[in-house]
């Protein structure tokens, strides 16, 4: 949506047909409409005038009548739901952590915490003493420590890449990092881990091969200039067959600082994800520092988690770069509520009972039938997504609809008005599949309303 100056009927050139200039309501008259005045207070004048201009343009093209009431109604229909261009989406793809859809959806507890922190808050203020707080984000740090008791200390930066950059800068700038060739990953959008690490001034010593790296490979590569060993979980792909990798316990015995990037943010072991590393186990086996993402399996906001030895975490957080990488009050609030509050949507979706998902699909199909919208329930395979648990499929169920509904569900008139959220599914064999494992059960009625609105578009 254009955010700059918009052309209205008042800006028509003198050469424009006189009938057009006379018959289309002026902008000032439309701005006086009580509904549009109320929207101006919520959205600001530029967005409101843009909506008016689009309505006047439709009248000019004879798509609608030119009387003031009709054009005002059209302008109201053109108003965006919010002053931001981001549109809320129901993720019905079956990918629980969808990077293109903002990764983890926040829990209601986290959303409430965001709202509380959105205004003036005590992020760096001690209400008891009336002085500056000793630790910024102490609530989030305390929640992390409670969730991972064997972490002596914790810290938060703005994403996992930032956590790795900070660790490499503090521990290894101008020195060597030993890393397996099988863990030189690309983390998405063409950002590659080797480039990220060497940008800090560190040098990489690659050991082993793509499919096999042993502890002996690391040991033989150690020199007087070796600053740390980095182990990275290849969370967006899986190598199978003739493979070998060194365990954390083996690497810890080599006597160098050991950093473990576990990636997806699992704080403790999960029964459905036995091959996914977690922070508690890694620290117990001897890692000095664990880094992870906050917006994947943890189910919180974008953040880079730092968990480990207290002296090491202290060095990282005192470095000048930590200031550039620190998170804001909204992230701290949402992260604390995610960890300390009830299970977030990702965790609930991960452990959802397939039978209950199937029943939800059946209820949704039944709710659509009175509206003349045919649908069937089909079996489906969901995935964790978001660079987590590669190769793991989750049994699920989906609603199969006519493929023609895909576009209006994403961007139909009701979505543009903000009446319903957009809905994104996936196309398979000429059908639109809406997998309900990745949809919060609380949103089932909203999903029905969105499908009905799309069918009427």
Image (spheres, grey):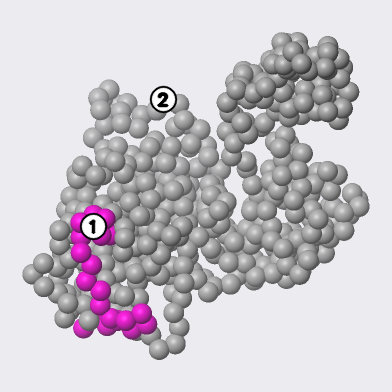
Q: Secondary structure at mark 2?
A: loop
| Numbered mark located on residue 120 in the image | 2
Residue 211 on the magenta segment: yes
In the picture shown, does residue 124 fall above or below 381? above
Q: Which residue of the protein is positioned furthest toward the left in this rendering?
A: 224
Residue 446 image position (x, y, % from top left): 73, 45
Res 218 quadrant in image: bottom left
Q: Position of residue 47 (x, y in %)?
A: 63, 25
Q: Residues within 10 Å of mark 2 (few under 14, many from 20)?
A: few
Residue matched to label 1: 168
* Magenta-drawn segment: 197-216
User: Where's the N terminus, which quadrant?
Assistant: top right
Whether 140 is drawn above or below 353: the answer is above
- 59 vs 104, nearest the viewer: 59
- The reply, left or right, for residue 264 in relation to residue 1 is left
Is 91 placed left or right of 414 in the picture? left
Q: What's the distance in space between the residues labelled 1 and 2, CA to CA?
A: 35 Å
What residue is drawn where x is 63% and y is 62%?
A: 94
Residue 33 magenta: no
Q: Residues within 10 Å of mark 1 (few under 14, many from 20)?
A: many
Residue drawn 32% across and 26% down?
A: 127
| Front-most of residues 129 and 289 | 289
Residue 225: quadrant of the picture? bottom left
256 vs 106, nearest the viewer: 256
* Residue 440 placement (x, y as % from top left): 64, 52
- In the orientation shown, which residue stands out farthest toward the front? 15
Q: Residue at x 26, y 31 (%)?
A: 133
User: Residue at image x 53%, y 74%?
Assistant: 391
Total numbered labels placed on residues in the image: 2
Residue 359 is at least partly visible in this image: no
């Amino acid at each position: 949506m254009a955010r700059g100056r918009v052309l209205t009927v008042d800006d028509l050139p003198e050469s424009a047909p006189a009938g057009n200039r006379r018959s289309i309501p002026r902008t000032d008259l439309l701005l006086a409409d009580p509904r549009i005045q109320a929207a101006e207070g919520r959205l600001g004048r530029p967005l409101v005038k843009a909506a008016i201009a689009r309505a006047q343009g439709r009248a000019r093209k004879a798509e609608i009548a030119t009387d003031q009431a009709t054009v005002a109604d059209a302008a109201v229909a053109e108003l965006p739901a919010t002053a931001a261009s981001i549109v809320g989406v129901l993720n019905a793809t079956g990918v629980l952590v969808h990077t293109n859809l903002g990764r983890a959806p926040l829990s209601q507890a986290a959303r409430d915490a965001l709202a509380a922190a959105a205004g003036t808050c005590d992020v760096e203020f001690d209400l008891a003493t009336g002085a500056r707080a000793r630790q910024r984000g102490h609530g989030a740090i305390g929640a992390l420590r409670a969730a991972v008791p064997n972490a002596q200390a914790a810290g938060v930066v703005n994403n996992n890449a930032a956590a790795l950059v900070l660790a490499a800068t503090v521990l290894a700038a101008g020195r060597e990092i030993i890393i397996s060739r099988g863990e030189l990953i690309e983390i998405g959008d063409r950002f590659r881990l080797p480039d990220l690490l060497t940008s800090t001034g560190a040098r990489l010593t690659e050991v082993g091969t793509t499919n096999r790296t042993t502890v002996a490979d690391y040991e033989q590569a150690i020199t007087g200039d070796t600053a740390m060993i980095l182990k990275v979980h290849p969370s967006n792909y899986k190598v199978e067959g003739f493979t070998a990798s060194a365990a954390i316990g083996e690497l810890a015995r080599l006597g160098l600082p050991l950093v473990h990037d576990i990636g997806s943010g699992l704080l403790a072991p999960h029964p459905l994800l036995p091959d996914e590393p977690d922070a508690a186990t890694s620290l117990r086996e001897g890692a000095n520092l664990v880094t992870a993402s906050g917006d994947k399996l943890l189910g919180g906001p974008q953040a880079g988690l730092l968990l480990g030895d207290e002296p090491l975490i202290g060095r990282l957080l005192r470095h000048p770069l930590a200031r550039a990488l620190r998170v804001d009050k909204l992230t701290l609030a949402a992260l604390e509520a995610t960890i300390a509050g009830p299970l977030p949507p990702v965790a609930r979706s991960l452990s959802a009972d397939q039978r209950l998902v199937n029943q939800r699909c059946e209820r949704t199909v039944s709710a659509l039938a009175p509206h003349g919208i045919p649908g069937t329930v089909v079996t489906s395979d969901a995935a964790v997504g978001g660079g987590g648990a590669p190769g793991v499929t989750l049994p699920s169920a989906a609603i199969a609809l006519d493929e023609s509904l895909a576009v209006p569900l994403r961007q139909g008139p009701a979505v543009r008005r903000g009446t319903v959220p957009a809905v994104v599914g996936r196309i398979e064999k000429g059908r639109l599949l809406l997998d309900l494992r990745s949809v919060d059960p609380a949103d089932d009625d909203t999903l029905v309303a969105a499908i009905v609105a799309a069918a009427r578009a």
